[in-house]
Amino acid sequence: MEELVIRDADVVDGSGADSYRADVVVDGGRIVGIVKEASAAGCQRPKARREVDAEGLVLSPGFVDMHAHSDLALLRDPDHSAKAAQGVTLEVIGQDGLSYAPVDDRTLGEVRRAIAGWNGSGDDIDFDWRTVGEYLDRLDRGIAVNAAYLIPQGTVRALAVGWEDREATPEELDRMRQLVAEGMEQGAVGMSSGLTYTPGMYAKDAELTELCRVVASYGGYYCPHHRSYGAGALEAYEEMVALTREAGCSLHLAHATMNFGVNKGRAPELLSLLDEALAAGADITLDTYPYTPGCTTLAAMLPSWANEGGPEQALKRLADEETAARVRHDLEVTGSDGCHGVPIEWDTIEISGVGDPALAEFVGRTVQESADARGEAPWVTARGLLLADRLAPTILQHVGHEENVRAIMRHRVHTGGSDGILQGAKPHPRAYGTFPHYLGHYVRELGVMSLEECVAHLTSRPAARLRLPDRGLVREGYVADLVLFDPATVAAGSSFAEPRVLPTGIPHVLVGGRFVIEDGRRTDALAGR
């Protein structure tokens, strides 16, 4: 007898087709039977050792978070309800060009300091890996949900070249090609870049193209956080489209937003650019989160020259009065490349987390508000905080536009990605709420998409990008990564005021046929791989 039957579910199967009522049978971690209209008179209903009554609930494939920052959280927090409770059954990590493999002893320490704001210091983690394969083996010891890994181009560059702003030598480029090839052979699905973050931003297009050729040879995709989401955003998108067409590489645009005042109402221009490329044969997808503010680190706002050489050099420059004055001018007058070429507006920069608890007074306030309370210029406040917290502060950046968010999420190549940073006292609510917020706010309340269409955006479409032949649909033979949710009540519990509240209306989540959320509560299952 099979393990589980889910009775009388409204199946939204991930294809975009209309829902249907069915009993769904699970055994051995896979879907082994789908009996449509099983409650009809005369129909012999499937039996199993366990039954779940799904009356009034939607059964869909598990949601795929195409842009996650759970690289250490998956190891640190076996519970991982932040994602599991949303119905996320797979996260794509290694994002924005900076993560923890491949590394050596030098670069591991540098990367840990550089992205402490994303993932914490890692002092509670045993870094017993150096290669991509060893990191994936570490995850395979047992994690809450599944994970896929992107080779981080900035980390690769740090290992082969360093943190200097210069072109790679031919020998260094060969080394980077080798590292990318090894990572793909060891199980990565593609390569990411952070082209407003050091040291990845120092790579010229020719260098990136050569690395993308390697990725393409293994059937992977390139996922860039490109060079600007503000001034010059459209040119930055065009650059990535042209680069990947030259390399013959699939392209997935990370958190594909149009932000800052210069881009208000300009999403149709981006979508027109993508439609033209798609019509010409390009293989392009993108992800977004359903919120207007962005989230990153305060140090990311600095001009690239200030971050050259790595975190310790950045701190030295900030400590020097003359150099700090140059940084301030770039931020406030010129518009630094770290702030996407737009002069910084301190009243849009909200501190969401700090590394040192003694600095908690800054959290939940904009830099402008803290500066006003202290009777000083906002740059003085920001500089002091960067130095005191050793570049660790994370920020919410309130620079988005709702009309752009809605327009982009409707596009046929759109997928969902939380870009969720789980660190800090007041993280962005997208970390805990992205997927139920799509289903509750944008589907049920606003009608921006149909339920069937939205589920396809969150399931089959990302599974196709990841080239997963047996996930992303409710089909016989497919892996039983499944979500049961109430379409009338599903909603994000997280908010900007209380960002760590879990969602409502998602009673059951299965990973590989095992319940990780059961009756709304996290089980002890570590079913992810």
Image (cartoon, grey):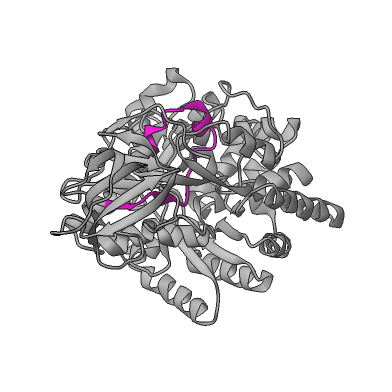
**377 displayed left or right of 469:** left
Q: Please report the residue visible at 57 percent of the width from the left and 35 percent of the height from the top.
A: 139
147 in relation to 191, above or below: above
Residue 20 within the segment the image draws in magenta? no
Residue toward you, 289 or 142: 142
Residue 119: percent from left, percent from top: 52, 33
**255 displayed left or right of 369:** right
Residue 524: percent from left, percent from top: 40, 26
415 in relation to 497, above or below: below
**182 displayed left or right of 68:** right
Q: Quadrant of the N terminus?
A: top left
Give the magenta part as a residue range.
59-83
Residue toward you, 326 or 517: 517
Q: Please report the residue visible at 85 percent of the width from the left and 57 percent of the height from the top.
A: 170
Q: How many marks?
A: 0
Camera sees residue 367: no
Residue 20: percent from left, percent from top: 23, 62
Camera sees residue 204: yes
Residue 16: percent from left, percent from top: 32, 66
